[in-house]
């Protein structure tokens, strides 16, 4: 039997969580308080939810984080780090610009469903300061932007908002590399936690986030716990209606 988190019982119906709020500005400390209870945001829209439909299956949504001190990399992640040693990195306040939009247009071609329309789906019109401090980690090859990730800065934590890369350089594993850059920057800043975003409790394109050693998942209502190795949890479509009634 695969190990379980308390919020995803083997039998029965879990209590669904689906919350959202508009917040125009919050302090670094207030951002930490949101992140530690499973909240994320795109622009000024804050949200948290513990279930989703993925490939026609009702599954759990799992906020993930790493403790920055003592974080170690797998052999595969170390290879990714070395493979990209030739790239130039720059950290700048986040802005909207044509260069980012061009990279986003290339990146979105990777999606076959839930295709995002614009970076403005994820970032406010003044992303460096609304709703909180945000920076961009630019990754360049011979001066050309090949990857970028947008990082919130809290008092004790950093949080990955969105990452994108040029699919032409897919062999470089730039999605993993940008997360490694974020973790390295969080360490430089002396932060305690780095939030990786969400993954699902069933196999998905987000599984690379689960591969970090020591990754923790928010066990809804029970706090943060080390993610059990091999964890899976899913339901057929039918229980979705039961869950709605239970709410």
Image (cartoon, rainbow, N blue to C red):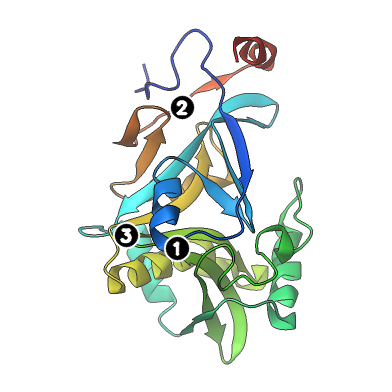
Return the disc, 3 or 1, that comes first in the chain's sequence.
3
Q: Residues within 10 Å of mark 1 (few under 14, many from 20)?
A: many
Above or below, 167 relative to 68 = below
Foreground disc of the pair 1, 2: 1
Q: Is residue 228 something that shows in the picture?
A: no
Can you identify the residue that label 1 sits on?
A: 179
Residue 232 is marked as 2
Against 9, residue 17 (above or below) is: below
Does residue 126 lie above or below 57 as drawn?
below
Residue 188 in percent (x, y) is at 29, 74
Which residue is found at the position 66% from the left and 59% from the top? 122
Circle 2 — which element? loop
Task: Mark yes or no: residue 182 visible.
Answer: yes
Give me the C-alpha separation between circle 1 and circle 2: 23 Å
Residue 192 falls in which quadrant of the image? bottom left
- Give percent across and percent down for residue 44: 63, 56
Say which residue label 3 marks.
Answer: 156
Location of residue 121 with respect to 6 vertically, above or below: below
> Split into 4 quadrants, where in the image is the C terminus?
top right
Mark 3 touches mark 1? (CB < 8 Å):
no
Q: Determine crowd level at label 3: few under 14, some 14-19, many 20+ residues with C-alpha closer than 10 A.
A: some
- 184 relative to 111 in the view: left or right: left
Q: Position of residue 60 (x, y in %)?
A: 53, 29
Name the element at disc 1.
helix
Mark 2 neighbour density, 10 Å: few (under 14) some (14–19) many (20 or more):
some
| C-alpha span from label 3 to label 2 | 30 Å
The reply to whether dot 1 and dot 2 touch (C-beta < 8 Å) is no
If you read the primary sequence from the N terminus, does the residue marked by circle 1 or circle 2 appear first?
1
């Amino acid at each position: 039997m695969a190990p379980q988190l308390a919020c995803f019982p083997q039998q029965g119906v879990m209590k669904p969580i689906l919350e959202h709020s508009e917040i125009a500005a919050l302090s670094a400390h207030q951002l930490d308080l949101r992140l530690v209870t499973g909240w994320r945001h795109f622009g000024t829209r804050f949200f948290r939810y513990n279930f989703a439909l993925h490939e026609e299956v009702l599954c759990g949504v799992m906020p993930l984080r790493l403790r920055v001190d003592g974080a170690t990399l797998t052999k595969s992640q170390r290879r990714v780090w070395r493979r990209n040693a030739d790239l130039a990195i720059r950290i700048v306040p986040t802005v909207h610009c044509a260069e980012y939009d061009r990279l986003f247009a290339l990146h979105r071609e990777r999606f076959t469903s839930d295709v995002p329309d614009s970076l403005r789906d994820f970032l406010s019109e003044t992303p460096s300061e609304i709703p909180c401090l945000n920076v961009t980690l630019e990754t360049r090859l011979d001066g050309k932007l090949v990857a970028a990730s947008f990082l919130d800065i809290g008092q004790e934590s950093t949080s990955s908002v969105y990452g994108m890369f040029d699919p032409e350089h897919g062999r470089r594993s730039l999605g993993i590399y940008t997360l490694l850059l974020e973790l390295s920057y969080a360490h430089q800043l002396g932060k305690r936690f780095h939030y990786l975003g969400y993954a699902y409790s069933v196999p998905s394109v987000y599984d690379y986030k689960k591969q970090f050693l020591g990754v923790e998942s928010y066990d809804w209502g029970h706090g943060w716990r080390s993610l059990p190795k091999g964890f899976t949890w899913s339901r057929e479509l039918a229980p979705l209606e039961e869950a709605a009634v239970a709410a």
